Image: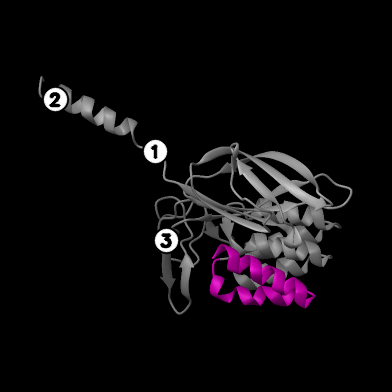
Amino acid sequence: MKRILPLLIGCLLLLGTVHAAPVTASISGERGLSFRLSLDGQPVSRGARAQIYLDQLRPGYHWADFYIPVGRGRGVNYRTRIFLADGFETNFVLVARPGFPPSLRTMSTVPLTPPVVSYPNQGPYPTPYPNNGHPAPGHQNHGYPHVAYPAPAYLLAPVEVENLLQAIQHRPFDDARMAIMRDALRESFIESQDARRLIKSLSFDENRIETAKYLYSRVADRHNFYQVYDALVFNSSIQEVQEYVQSIR
């Protein structure tokens, strides 16, 4: 017993020094918007930038203070609280439009080390099932291997995609359609061809751009993401999404 007690104390001390692994984040200004950033009271950038990449951050909540230059030595201050999930890279976009207060939107959360499996004749895909490699109760196995995934997620079956499209088409406005997409894909993946169909259901190209950026983190076959660009109307829109994809790869 005398030998075990020091060992237990040592283990407790060791556990007390263990911290959560650092996480990463990126913040981009919408349409090239430049800004300065302080995180938890510490300056991150010296000058104004259109994009900032952050690493070695602790998971949890942080205070983000933005300064957005508006010309002639003037600027807008904006403060918000952000949450960084353990084991993920969180990607934000800073929005500042005339007549509206600034806002910071979460565009995607991407696993830092997602496991990848090879599907027969299809190439690598993120693993689809959460429950230690087994599908959820009542969920059919559509021919995918049983593998573990660190966050609850699975690949939507074709019938599920069709149901989602029908639900979207019953909504007359883009805002409602986008909200349904995000809710349906919060814990799911889709294929690039289905992402293109979802994006095409939106009326305005600005909303298509925002949705394409969000769906990049929810697409299983990212090597086919080029198919999504067919849903965008203007070349400038395609370029904006391509630059976003390159920035978070």
Nearer to us of marks 1 and 3 is 1
In the rendered structure, does residue 223 fall within the stretch colored magenta?
yes
Question: Where residue 189 sits in the image (x, y, percent)?
Answer: 57, 61
Q: Is residue 158 visible?
A: no
Q: Which residue is mark 2?
A: 4
Question: Where residue 211 sits in the image (x, y, percent)?
Answer: 71, 61
Of 158 and 189, the residue lying toward us: 189
Image height of 47 relative to 16, above or below: below
What's the magenta region? 220-249
**Along the horizontal axis of the image, is 89 left or right of 28?**
left
Please identify the quarter of the rendering in which residue 231 is found. bottom right
Residue most extreme to the right: 99
Please identify the quarter of the rendering in which residue 114 is found. bottom left
| Numbered badge on residue 115 | 3
* Residue type beneath disc 2: Ile
Precedes in sequence: disc 2 or disc 1: 2
Image height of 16 relative to 219, above or below: above
| Numbered badge on residue 97 | none
**Along the horizontal axis of the image, is 11 left or right of 236?**
left
* Residue type beneath disc 3: Pro
Precedes in sequence: disc 1 or disc 3: 1
Q: Secondary structure at mark 3?
A: loop
Q: Is residue 77 visible?
A: yes
Q: CA distance from mark 1 to mark 3?
A: 23 Å
Of 32 and 234, the residue lying toward us: 32
- Which residue shows up at 76% across the image and 70% down it? 200
Residue most extreme to the front: 73
Would you say the residues marked 1 and 3 are in contact, meaning their CB atoms lie under 8 Å apart?
Answer: no
- Which residue shows up at 35% across the image and 37% down it? 18
